[in-house]
Amino acid sequence: MREEEIETAIKVVVVGNGAVGKSSMIQRYCKGVFTKDYKKTIGVDFLERQIEVNNEEVRLMLWDTAGQEEFDAITKAYYRGAQACVLAFSTVDRDSFEAIESWKKKVEDEVGEIGMVIVQNKIDLIDDAVVEPEEAEDLARRLQLRFYRTSVKDNLNVDEVFMYLAEKYLFQINCEVEEPMEVPKVSIGYGLLNPGLNNHVNEDDSKPKVKSISKLNKKKHKNLSSPPDEGNIKLRPSKQRTRGKKSVLQTAKCVIL
């Protein structure tokens, strides 16, 4: 089977308290639409999107999970097999921010350590914020996770969140980790809504540096038929045949399965 007939499939779970914007986030990302009023998610919803990351076809399977405790028994079963995770909280919901560590633990209890990102949604409501910017940034540094501020309504940083998770996963399966070395301090990005507000924070600089994303396809994992080292990732990439044809999903459109 030729390499161009292979695509990588990544299962991404989106977790967090109810009403933080998880459903609207994946709808915006996959369908390009925003609806203000969503009904409470009962159990799990699923969407997918085909993207290209450095000339490599990637299929993101996004699982939107209910945030209410009464659905825990259902949603936990869908964490299994996940290779990436979005931990979401709302700018105007203090409880959702304080629950982030709990959600992280729930996912890791089921699947171990996987690529994660913290997302502060509804940044368009910054005037009503109940979480200080420094608090969110400190949490991200303490948990050593990348942090983004997003507005699903204004489509700010939504694509960046999922592109980062896809790139991170491909790093893990395609690149060998170099010896730990000193790396630059955390870099801060600036958003579109408020030039004075940091809209993403990189992961903690204590992690080992990995090779450039530009070398992604040059440094393939030595044996993709067997799982990578457990210290780096728990699951091997999902692959499927495309029979040498371009997928209809390559236009970045999504379907509900």
Image (tube, rainbow, N blue to C red):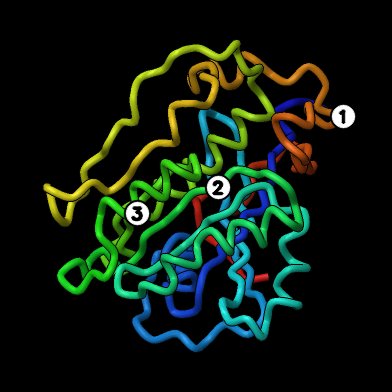
Q: Seen in the image, is 111 located left or right of residue 46? A: right
At label 2, the amino acid type is Met
At label 3, the amino acid type is Ala
Which of the marked residues, 1 or 3, is nearer the chain's N terminus?
A: 3
Residue 160 is situated, as x and y percent measured from the top left of the image, at: 40, 46
Residue 233 is situated, as x and y percent measured from the top left of the image, at: 72, 35
Residue at image mark 2:
116
- The foreground one among 145 and 80 is 145
Quarter of image, res 151: bottom left
Residue 51 is situated, as x and y percent measured from the top left of the image, at: 53, 45
Q: Nearer the viewer, mark 1 or mark 2?
A: 2
Q: Residues within 10 Å of mark 2 (few under 14, many from 20)?
A: many
Residue at image mark 3:
136
Q: CA distance from mark 1 to mark 3?
A: 38 Å
Q: CA distance from mark 1 to mark 2?
A: 23 Å
Residue at image mark 1:
226
Identified at 55% across, 35% down, the residue is 168
